[in-house]
Image (cartoon, coloured by chain):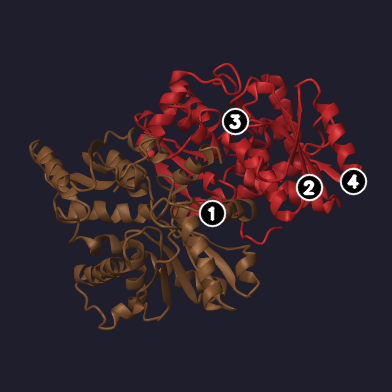
Chain colours: A red, B brown
Amino acid sequence: MPMISPLVVPTPVQRIECAEAERRGNAVYLKRDDLLPFSFGGNKVRIACEFVKDLRDRGCDALVMYGDRRSNLCRVLANLCSIEGIPCVMVATDADGGSGDSLNARIVDRFGVEVLECASDSIAATVDRAFRLLSGRGLTPYYIYGDRTGTGNEGTAARAYASAYPEIGEWERSSGTSIDLVVTPYGTGCTQGGLVAGSLLAHDGREIVGISISSRPEGRALSVLRSTVRGYFEKEGLACPADYADHIHLETKYTCGGYGVVDERVVELVETMLRENSVPMDPTYTGKAFRGMLDLIEERGMTGKNILFLHTGGLPLFFDYLTAGN
Amino acid sequence: MPMISPLVVPTPVQRIECAEAERRGNAVYLKRDDLLPFSFGGNKVRIACEFVKDLRDRGCDALVMYGDRRSNLCRVLANLCSIEGIPCVMVATDADGGSGDSLNARIVDRFGVEVLECASDSIAATVDRAFRLLSGRGLTPYYIYGDRTGTGNEGTAARAYASAYPEIGEWERSSGTSIDLVVTPYGTGCTQGGLVAGSLLAHDGREIVGISISSRPEGRALSVLRSTVRGYFEKEGLACPADYADHIHLETKYTCGGYGVVDERVVELVETMLRENSVPMDPTYTGKAFRGMLDLIEERGMTGKNILFLHTGGLPLFFDYLTAGN
């Protein structure tokens, strides 16, 4: 792993002002994973570190990643590969609108990544092409998501938040505050799946809720979450608790209609968080999920709860928002 | 102070890759004050907190600040005043090129700040105007820099880094690493002055070097630093060590000709830091000062030293750089 160390450190937890939640007697805390001290922070720092460890464990020496040009994960992986001297190919889809002019794309373009553009119906074929390209150079490539269809490596990414989960308990003990509910944006399922695995290992029965930010259908999203939790236990060589699926909670009604689609309430949330708490949230992930969490609190009629929202980062997307004339 | 807490926490120290310094057997560490968890971080978070505490101590209820539109300090103060409900007027100079379209300006404009534009030769008169404006509303304004000419409050700002200084010693003890030299960008002198005061209080005799990033003449810059250190001891009611001036070290030859002026080597440094260490530095402050530090290491022929560079933040300026088509 890189000399700059440590890349992953326990992140601060802050209580924030949140009138909407507080008027029902709830308190909202943020776990600031956006402040992880590498590549502009975010949950993807922890996840990228797990992928690179796994690449080494498997004896690979080149990396194939997939995402759209705004991807936070691809930005962090590109940065890590650049530092580690690992050749890196990005299979870049134009699904969800592309946006090659995003700040994440500008950062990735600095890191010597080879970008293979593809349509959303030819991802598997383009992953194959990336493999042939790297193998032809005598390298042994690693695909972050497993096989060409993007399955089989769920357990690796889940390790990141299974390992991070104990930080919540440590903060509870040091602060004397008990967290009732943990909320995280749901995009790929890696983060939520890892948190659920961590909670299962801790036997704390805590509710962990994912707020979906894309139009991935609920059935598919739940299936991915189940594979992720099972994949984690399998990879660790541990028995997965029989009732694990009961610990997966996902809300899919706050998506505004799809990935990257926002409404005025999400924009207002982003502005309010900046003004009242000085916390940058982006409209695509954290702002949308936090807005959904507030609606969920209202709909469930929650009172007197301590709620921890995982700030999963995405700072370049916040600055995309600011520079877009907002 | 605001509910979001703590705004000021000990920041991580990281060893980074730095071939230029390492080829002489030196090691470079960054103290990541850019990751302070408030308003995009930076040294100005600590400093703004001291100003707002002092405003309250003096029984004031409105704030007058001064800076150009790209100012990091004004961004943090605007954010803090917005959260605290403190009316805030910014005296904004167009000296040094202005740049009202910077990200810091976009952020400040969200916080209900009244901006009074002025030429660089009418700052004192505009500060007076800001005072009349606020007094006319029955408020008791506070000017961050003291009197209308901008002097008399140096000790307040210096408190920030006099208080932060012990974090360096704590990190040394916990890591088993001894720091020989601390380097900081020099802009206003608040940060360096505070560090020098902290070192004097610790009686550790450590060399603290400021690298000037603007064309403020050396004599004037040293005079400001001396006033800042003296102002700190005076404010704290402590005796200032007689030899305090011997502990002030300033380098003024790495300015590229003035504030905001950069050359290719500074740009290359910014790109290298991003690529090799995943650390954002901006060309105006941290990038220029770090470049100067490397030149200083070479010129002094330093070998075998552990050097700590204070990353003073300025993240919005880094993103200004990225969005400017770089």
On whether disc 2 and disc 3 are found on a single subunit, the reply is yes
Q: Chain of mark 1?
A: A
| Residue hosting label 3 | A101
The image position of residue A284, as x and y in percent, is 55, 28
Q: Residues within 10 Å of mark 1 (few under 14, many from 20)?
A: few
| Residue hosting label 4 | A137
What amino acid does circle 3 point to?
A: Asp
Q: Chain of mark 3?
A: A
Asked if residue A227 can be seen in this view, the reply is yes
Q: Are marks 2 and 1 in contact (CB under 8 Å)?
A: no
The CA span between labels 2 and 1 is 38 Å
Q: Relative to B29, does residue B81 appear above or below in the rendering?
A: above
What amino acid does circle 4 point to?
A: Arg
Which quarter of the image is occupied by the C terminus of chain B?
A: top right
- Residue with the most extreme front position: B257
Q: Which numbered disc, 2 or 1, marks the residue that appears first in the sequence?
A: 2
Q: Chain of mark 4?
A: A
The CA span between labels 2 and 3 is 23 Å
Q: Residues within 10 Å of mark 3 (few under 14, many from 20)?
A: few
